[in-house]
Amino acid sequence: MIQWQKYSHSLPKILYPLMLLLKPIIQLVILLWFLCFKVPPPDAFIVQNPPSVPTLVAVKWASSLRKSAFIVDWHNFGYTLLGLSVGRSSPFVSIYHWFEKHYGQMANGSLCVTRAMQHELAQNWGIRATVLYDQPPEFFCPTSLQEKHKLFSRLNRYLCHPLGVRDCVTATTTGIGADDQNETLFTTLVDTDILLKPNRPALVVSSTSWTPDEDFGILLEAAVMYDRRVAALLDENDSADEGVLWKEISGGKQYLYPRLLFIITGKGPEKEKYEEKIKRLNLKRVAFRTMWLSAEEYPLLLGSADLGVCLHTSSSGLDLPMKVVDMFGCGLPVCAVSYSCIDELVKVEKNGLLFSLSSELADELLMLFRGFPNECDALKSLKNGALETGSSARWAAEWEEHAKPLISEVISRNLN
């Protein structure tokens, strides 16, 4: 299918509204051509929402023309996402909302991702939906020690020797080569055995789109608080030379609270802005790495981490972050930003914790990592809960139990 080209940076601002109207019209024509003439007639069309315009319109028209059932899979509300970029009071948001509701009500059946969304659709949209929770694919699973060592060996260059960076990681890994296959920041190969280093840093992973709806500043503030509070708890002088601390760590010394290495994955418009802020933090026990991982390496990283952090805040307050679902699939406990329906996924003190403020996240980091790696019982308990959550339900089982009966019923009604 022909993709819509992005001209936003080269066009005068006065043409933005025209392009905003032209884009869905062109996409509608392309979609109708494929759905009505290029593919064989199906028993049912299932369309994910959002986006709503023009997909809901195109699929509804195609299903009517081809006498197929029309099923909507609600993942969020498109008008709330549009409101983030153009403002909730924009007339475009009102028009989008009308289209979304009008065509959503025409569906022969509906799926949605939370009970909260199910209630909203029933009460305010007049739509009955079946809850189908997102589940992780099979390749999101715990990572073996051998896989961890291989992954960290491949990442040695980026973790231990990033260009122009001096922190609690680079200063303590001078003996590890960029292409070292026997030793990594976290593991070491002794004869044929792979061992986790006892004074390794705790690995915290967060995936972000680097957009305004994810306040990455909360994570930076929590990192600063962790660094300062650990120094205070260990009665360290603020003016103490970090070089002495790093030399002791390099020599194998363990502290009650570990170093933290945050690996932030993803691409987005605000990445460079926050990378500049990270460079100015000057922390003694916390380091950051930003990187883009392949689809094969990302699940391995999640399965190798000690904690996940999710900064997602839903535009509607009614959807759940897929990144947390993937983390649970890898057995990774999560600290997540709290909002209205996140408790349908994150069970406090079972598989994760919730926070609203950076100070709360800092408190959680201190509590979970005290005594790391062997004496952190709270973290181990959450790890067990995350493993249980990830293994209890997978996509195939969820589909068979909830989606398949609805789809079969809708197709049967449509044929009759």
Image (tube, rainbow, N blue to C red):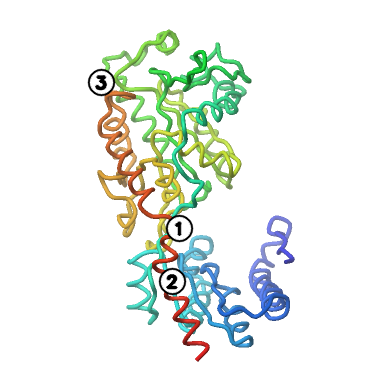
| Residue 3, label in figure | none
Q: Secondary structure at mark 3?
A: helix
Q: Residue at horizontal 60%, vertical 74%?
A: 54
Nearest to viewer (mark 3 / mark 2): 2
| Percent of width and height locating residue 351 | 31, 45
Q: Which residue is mark 2?
A: 111
| Percent of width and height locating residue 403 | 44, 70
Sooner in the amino-acid sequence: mark 3 or mark 2 = 2
| Percent of width and height locating residue 97 | 48, 75
Q: Is 106 left, or right, of 119 in this rendering?
A: right
Q: Which residue is mark 3?
A: 233
Quick check: can you spot residue 359?
A: yes
Give how far apart the Cα atoms at labels 1 and 3 are: 45 Å
| Percent of width and height locating residue 267 | 58, 45
Q: Secondary structure at mark 2?
A: strand
Sooner in the amino-acid sequence: mark 1 or mark 3 = 3
Q: Residues within 10 Å of mark 1 (few under 14, many from 20)?
A: some
| Residue 395, label in figure | 1
Nearest to viewer (mark 1 / mark 2): 1
Sooner in the amino-acid sequence: mark 1 or mark 2 = 2
Q: Residues within 10 Å of mark 3 (few under 14, many from 20)?
A: few
